[in-house]
Image: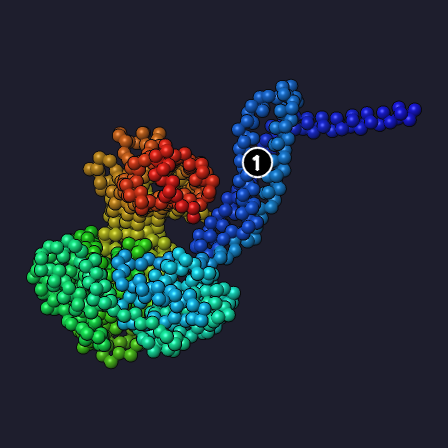
Amino acid sequence: MGGCVSVSLSCDREVNQFSQWLCVSGSYIQNLSENLASLQKAMGVLNAKRDDVQGRINREEFTGHRRRLAQVQVWLTRIQTIENQFNDLLSTCNAEIQRLCLCGFCSKNVKMSYLYGKRVIVLLREVEGLSSQGVFDIVTEAAPIAEVEELPIQSTIVGQDSMLDKVWNCLMEDKVWIVGLYGMGGVGKTTLLTQINNKFSKLGGGFDVVIWVVVSKNATVHKIQKSIGEKLGLVGKNWDEKNKNQRALDIHNVLRRKKFVLLLDDIWEKVELKVIGVPYPSGENGCKVAFTTHSKEVCGRMGVDNPMEISCLDTGNAWDLLKKKVGENTLGSHPDIPQLARKVSEKCCGLPLALNVIGETMSFKRTIQEWRHATEVLTSATDFSGMEDEILPILKYSYDSLNGEDAKSCFLYCSLFPEDFEIRKEMLIEYWICEGFIKEKQGREKAFNQGYDILGTLVRSSLLLEGAKDKDVVSMHDMVREMALWIFSDLGKHKERCIVQAGIGLDELPEVENWRAVKRMSLMNNNFEKILGSPECVELITLFLQNNYKLVDISMEFFRCMPSLAVLDLSENHSLSELPEEISELVSLQYLDLSGTYIERLPHGLHELRKLVHLKLERTRRLESISGISYLSSLRTLRLRDSKTTLDTGLMKELQLLEHLELITTDISSGLVGELFCYPRVGRCIQHIYIRDHWERPEESVGVLVLPAIHNLCYISIWNCWMWEIMIEKTPWKKNLTNPNFSNLSNVRIEGCDGLKDLTWLLFAPNLINLRVWGCKHLEDIISKEKAASVLEKEILPFQKLECLNLYQLSELKSIYWNALPFQRLRCLDILNNCPKLRKLPLDSKSVVKVEEFVIKYKEKKWIERVEWEDEATQYRFLPTCRLR
């Protein structure tokens, strides 16, 4: 009996288990379609959350000062895994649905359908779980400090090897904590310290961080703290607003936990490390400080017992440096030139800066008469004891060798900027035009061509230095700047002719005995809050007041006695909200820059400036209107990009009245771009255009953006617009063109335009140099093969002049171009993030002319593993150029 009961219980249990399995199994099979739909919906929600989080991360990581939290990265990685599983399930879902029978209640293969249905349910639960976890208040943290950043250095360095080894070995000694390098200007101190910095980047030395700070003359505690703070990641508005004691505490709290090296270039007086916040280097913390200075006395004040003097080059090294600068072709152009060149080398007395400058000047002089003249003109110097008597005259020879007074005036003008300041070439040429050094009567384009020609001459003569990374900027060596200021002052005889007190912390106007003698004045990068008084500057032509961030008020009287003023720069004065009406008395003004100010309206007096040629109002984000601008009858350039005042129909009508207008930079909504066809003068003048739509006014946007083929357009940015297609059309003022194109368009930036599926219109931009496409979620092709065939009669190879292609967060992008392209100038291809479907690059074994200068940058390791190369030769050519960011 008991056995029967036992058997009965066992059967009941088995029946129950089988029933439960059958129920679950039935759910897996019977509800498969509904479960798949739920999974797709949940996956869509998860992907949306992923995109939002990824967007936050990208914005915060962009500056390099923050990195994503580990828990956030784990969540994102898990989503990637889940997405792969989801795509795998989805690829067979049609076959699984077709396997079902009896109206979906059963399957032709129960086991396989059961297993598939179970995978769907398990994945659905994981997706829902991940979705609930994807709520992050914080997604990034402060990034660890990079140990050392390699600095650009001049290509020709001679005679510093032994000194480099000596300084490096001294720094590595346990009992040496501060190293001081002193020597005269132009002797190579900065070059040597740069080599030390770069040696740390290669050898490390066991330090946590190496900090480079350019100090220069009249440096403030705030300036030095700012440089150190940027390196340590202490940036932001809150930190900038702290006083020097609070900033010092922050710096100290970071550095006291680190073994650091602090490199201070060009100090002119003792730097109080404690005031700045830098822990004093010692044997206990293992930290080091090295600096350069002109004065041996400063070395003593800094606590250096045994400073190292950086001396001029000996005769042999000096000759080697001059030979390299002059070049074998010039030296061999006449049998007597080498002997004369040795005399020139001797007259430079081993000063590297003089050898560099003179060598560059003589490199294209190939007649014996020119070399004889050089030996006669150069002043001999023996011990460099007097700057004005011996050093500056040597450098002045290159200035005297410039052809024409215009080039000389253009060079001297560059000394108005602070030490080590990077000057934008385009801005500099506009200054020169307004000063009258370059004539603009034949048009802006010819004037700029002349300006760039002068810049090329000055760079080749080593009187200006071109930016190492940014070729659109130039700067001046400190010694060359001193020489320029010396010449500006009539060789030191009339020092008030040119007042340059830039970047020295002034909070009130400098004391000047004779204001009537001042012709140019640079007070930029100071700490003015108010500018008061009425200096009688009847000869003043140029006045620089830009980058005075605290400037709130300019008195009514200030501009009353400046009848000759032609150039006034007030840009980047972020606290300045209004200008005095007396600006109307600047009757000679040709150039006015108010970019980056907080002005809310233009003063009525501005309408009286009938000679004004250049008006810059970019980034004036509180400027409501520029109504009445048509009174400025001489206006040639108007810059409004990123201003609150955008291009609308009313403004177009007014700009049509300005018959001399040649250049406009502006913002405009996509819905108003078509209006440009109605206003040919405005259309012809646009060079930079920023097309963006207002989220709160979607009715202003268009589905198809029709761009007029503006000949002068150089830069176009399309941001957060809703169009699904971009087309181009011939303009009414260029009807004779067979094919419309953007012949001068060199830079294109497209961001957040989710409706776009291709950018085939770029075929009509044959001179494109930089292309940046970010965050267009549905973009599938850069150039669509089908659409190209429909708009072109014959195939046009795009991107022949492209130098940089930047692709970022393009989740649907599959193709840049369907065939391999030659790419004559391409230097950089950036695949920064989230371009998973871009497997084939338009490259073959013959693409990219200078492959040694080419780099493919990518941010996801899996991406490079999935690249489908054209063949082994292509892979062999380009795989070594790939760099993980």
- Kind of residue at disc 1: Lys
Residue 48 % position (x, y): 53, 42
Residue at numbered disc 1:
41
288 lies above or below 92 = below
Residue in the image at 39% along x and 43% along y: 882
Label 1: few (<14), some or many (≥20) within 10 Å? few
Residue 146 % position (x, y): 45, 57
Residue 282 % position (x, y): 47, 71
Quadrant location of residue 800?
A: top left
772 lies above or below 597 = above
Front residue of 670/450: it is 450
Residue farthest along the bottom direction in this orientation: 513
Front residue of 507/621: it is 507
Residue 106 % position (x, y): 65, 21
Front residue of 95/477: it is 477
- Whether residue 360 is visible, yes or no, is no
- Whether residue 402 is visible, yes or no, is yes
Color encoding of the figure: rainbow
Residue in the image at 59% along x and 34% along y: 39
Q: How many numbered circles does the render carry?
A: 1
